[in-house]
Amino acid sequence: MGAIRQCSRSACRQSAVATLTYVYADSTAVLGPLATYAEPHCYDLCEQHAGSLTVPRGWEVLRLAMPSTPQQPGPDDLLALANAVRDAAALPAKAPQTPAQRGPHSALEAPAGTEGTRRGHLRVLREPS
């Protein structure tokens, strides 16, 4: 379960109850029930800000039906959660891996067997003799 989402308006700390999305091609603002998860180009609004929403002149507001009471988890949601917990408990625990021991090297000494090799965008160079 995620954290309770707050209203996107500045300095508002109320819980979000609606999601606002703009459809720029149609000059429309769509205000509906709170989306399942936070979208990057949508705005979550509290009840007060959702009720007092205004849009630019020439734009339309499409208000979708809002549920009268917050949706409670149903039996299917609780069963899915119980199954997920049961599956996670059944997985064998992995032993923690210990990092390989490294030997002492001087600051300019390349690791053994790496003459001219690349690691990502870096290249290991030996000190000129």
Image: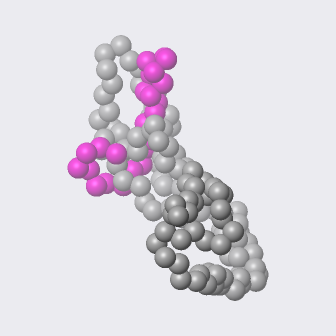
- Residue 62: in magenta span: no
- Residue 79 position in % (x across, y down): 71, 69
Residue nearer the viewer, 97 or 9: 97
Q: Residue furthest left?
A: 11
Q: Quadrant of residue 94?
A: bottom right
- Residue 13 position in % (x across, y down): 28, 55
Q: Residue furthest top?
A: 58
Left or right: residue 96 versus residue 105 is right
- Residue 119 position in % (x across, y down): 61, 58
Does residue 89 lie above or below 2 as drawn? below
The residue shown at (44%, 28%) is: 22
The residue shown at (50%, 34%) is: 64
- Residue 113 position in % (x across, y down): 69, 68
Residue 86 visible to the viewer? no
The residue shown at (40%, 44%) is: 44
Identify the magenta region: 8-30
Left or right: residue 37 versus residue 44 is right
Residue nearer the viewer, 64 or 99: 99
The residue shown at (69%, 86%) is: 95
Left or right: residue 113 versus residue 31 is right
Residue 21 visible to the viewer? yes
Residue nearer the viewer, 123 or 60: 123
Q: Residue furthest front?
A: 129
- Quadrant where the image shows the N terminus: bottom right
Residue nearer the viewer, 67 or 19: 19
Does residue 122 lie above or below 111 as drawn? above
User: How many dots with numbers?
Assistant: 0
